[in-house]
Amino acid sequence: MKNEQELKNVVKERYAKIAEQGKAENAASCCGATTPSNKVYNIMMDDYSETKGYIEDADLGLGCGLPTHFAQIQKGDTVIDLGSGAGNDCFVARHETGAEGKVIGVDFTPAMIKKARINAEKLGYNNVEFREGDIDDMPVNENVADVVVSNCVLNLVPNKEKVVKEIFRVLKPGGHFSISDIVLVGDLPDALRQDAEMYAGCVAGAIQKQDYLNHITNAGFTGVTIQKEKTITIPEDILSKYLSAEEITSFQNGNTGIFSITVYAEKPGAKQEKKKVKLSELGAESCCNPATGCC
């Protein structure tokens, strides 16, 4: 397998192409990165269509869960979405946090950032912004977010432990995260584990479930809870690109499991009560002077 920077370059290049693909193609493959399967649709993703705040144009079919369903986002919250893509989870989070809150999407693929910004501008969402950067070195100050969400992205980053520490850094004391991701129980066949396409497809980069949970606990989080878990089955027509018929049978009948899990955890500390600023506190001049931008 390639080194960390080479892996990041593979993912960035692949996801630049995925940004221009249709949802159906992405959803019928492994995170949009592998050849679509003819045998099954929605290999990893969950259905957002009944979710409040859902914007179809922003849904590229790349997720493996519905983290915003479990994230307990409140009005006025500041939310960070890691690997924000075309903005799908950001716009769902914005529905929950309201116009008085703020949503920040972080993604390292310029094509995704461009697509997300266009979507936000169409919607007139002035409190949703997208920042280009790595999620293991976020362009965000510490103690900023009430909530962090992410959907099938941490598995794409070589250094998961560093990402978890970054999540801890950007969360406010008392803040929490809800993240959907792919994990393993048992070892993948070498042909899958060593393939760059399967890495970009959210499979080869997945780590052992217990190691994943240990990274969260070791970073200092408490209240670690698996909110949802589902089995991911890779269809034979995708596996056949990497494995022989005998190897496919052995893999399918073996002890290795691929799972999507949605994990919740909290950063210790007391939550700060949000202060609502009254117009009278701003002063009559600041409220009525167009030069201030208030009016």
Image (spheres, rainbow, N blue to C red):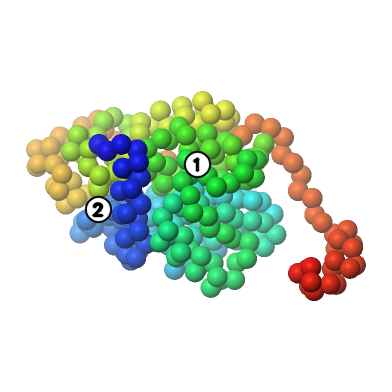
Label 2: which secondary element = loop
Locate residue 212, reporting x and y percent: 42, 32
Q: Is residue 30 visible?
A: yes
Q: Count the labels in the image.
A: 2
Residue 61 in which image quadrant: bottom left
Residues packed near mark 1 inside 10 Å, few (<14), some (14 to 19) or many (20 plus): few
Q: Is residue 52 left or right of residue 83?
A: right
Label 1: which secondary element = loop
Which numbered dot is residue 97? none
Q: Is residue 123 left or right of residue 30?
A: right
Locate residue 138, reporting x and y percent: 52, 44
Look at the image and tell me in which quarter the N terminus lies.
Answer: top left
Is 294 rendered above or below residue 78?
Answer: below
Residue 249 in which image quadrant: top left
Q: Give the labeled residue for mark 1.
A: 137
Look at the image and tell me in which quarter the C terminus lies.
Answer: bottom right
Residue type, mark 2 in image: Thr
Q: Is residue 226 visible?
A: no
Camera-side residue of 145 and 76: 145
Q: Residue at x 59, y 71 (%)?
A: 124
Of the numbered discs 2 and 1, the one sitting upstream in the chain is 2
Residue 156 in which image quadrant: top left
Q: Give the labeled residue for mark 2.
A: 34
Q: Residue at x 32, y 31 (%)?
A: 185
Locate residue 87, reporting x and y percent: 49, 60
